[in-house]
Image (cartoon, rainbow, N blue to C red):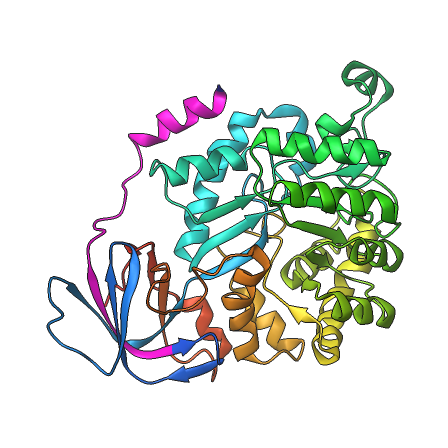
Amino acid sequence: MRHRLLAAAVLSTLAMPAFAEDSALHCGKLFDSRSGKLLGAHTVVVRNGKVAEVLAGRVEAVANATAIDLSDRTCMAGWTDLHVHLGSQSSPASYSEGFRLDDVDFAFRSVGYAEKTLMAGFTSVRDLGGEVTPHLRDAINQGLVKGPRIWAAGKGIATTGGHGDPSNGLNDRLAHLIGPPGPTEGVINSVDDARQAVRQRYKDGSDVIKITATGGVLSYAKSGDAPQFTIDEVKVIVETAKDYGYKVAAHAHGEEGMYRAVAGGVTSIEHGSYMSDRVMALMKQKGTWYVPTLYAGRFVADKAKIDGYFPEIVRPKAARIGAQIQDTAGKAYRSGVKIAFGTDQGVGPHGDNAREFQYMVEAGIPAAYALQAATIHAASVLGVDDQGVVEAGKRADIIAMPGDPLADIGNVMKVDFVMKDGTVYRTPTR
């Protein structure tokens, strides 16, 4: 009910895009996410929310289409961030806010976070944990608020005491009041529980399943890398998810839990801090994707240096595990593991997602590959073929920025044109 009230409240307060009409985008350069190459001038014709034609050169006077001059900019497919949490954003108050705020408070915050994400060039996201996000997804799809297309996991699936157990850190009185969480709350301890938890996510309206295969950095628990599922439990989650057309993403820092998740058939490993050669070999064998979330690693390592930002039980994990991820990403790329783009924003500030590209390049990943990671690779992880490339018949998700991001990856921070499904949400101010 609270979320329905939220949608009604924001409807009258947010200005929606100025137009969603047929367009002819005159692009100075066009990044081809299939080849990873930057092409010369092209005209992209958009009709009914889809790319109708992609024409070489500048083609004037396209019939019944409004011209949009991006001749001094680089165009490309809208980006996808495969790991966000739009219902929250890290701060020193984050741990106490869970006791003081209601879901509707987080829902109102998520509206602003979603808009910032879209305006930064991210036309799609995969939200891997947050009960308000399925409702935010629906509000965006209904045109009530501005934001990216969302694949929402809802509540992640954990084990007792693991990363994602909502009772971690509670005193005995509070723990007694809420009772031990079970599959309905996303906490399992058997293969039967695992099936029930996935089915509950289906009932809740999730689009993807997220499991916490190891401990986590920011959870109120000592271990950040201990394994938290058996292989049989992971296999049952993956098999049950397949029944509903779901893919499974696995949060994982530690080596053993990561190996079990890959062996169990998950689609992607998130974070992967202590990924070993053994895990990389299995990922390549099974075609498992890696979503490094370098931004989150850098962010928590920096904040761990600040007294009072994290609880003391969290601080050493943030300092130790966060700093490891960037080195792992470079090694995984050189090893041939498939990499897709994700930030874990919600840990860091929403709207700053594109900084992940810079961290990927610093890790030794070529700029072209990093851009592919957020376009065509991300579409593969999601299991869709209608986005991630600027081609006839695909969604008209197109962004543009001044400068050449292949020559200077810092240009990704300058996005000033955003189109999603043919609707323009941001235009350059010249």
Q: Residue at x 67, y 63 (%)?
A: 289
Residue 348: x %, y % from top left = 60, 52
- Confirm whether the magenta stretch covers residue 23: yes
Examine the rendered structure and indicate whether residue 316 appears above or below residue 286.
above
Counting from the top left corner in percent of width and height, residue 82 is at 58, 55
Q: Nearer the viewer, residue 226 or 116?
A: 226
Q: Nearer the viewer, residue 343 or 98?
A: 343
Task: Specify whether 2 is left or right of 13.
Answer: right
The magenta segment: 2-30
Above or below: residue 327 compared with residue 166: below
Q: Nearer the viewer, residue 373 or 205?
A: 205
Residue lying at 30% horizontally and 33% vertically, measured from the top left: 13
Can you say whether 56 is above or below 216 in the image? below
Q: What number of labels is visible?
A: 0
Q: Position of residue 197 (x, y in %)?
A: 72, 32
Coordinates of residue 19 in the picture (x, y in percent): 21, 51
Q: For this view, does 120 lie left or right of residue 253?
A: left
Residue 308 visible somewhere in the drawing = no
Nearer the observer, 40 or 273: 40
Side of 333 relative to 370 (left or right) = right
Q: Dividing the image into 4 quarters, which one contains the C terminus?
A: bottom left
Query: Residue placed at 47% from the left, 32% from the top?
Result: 108
**Residue 297 appears in the rendering:** yes
State the residue at coordinates (71%, 72%).
337
* Residue 414 is a magenta residue: no
Quadrant hosting residue 212: top right
Q: In which quadrant of the rendered view does residue 414 lie?
A: bottom left
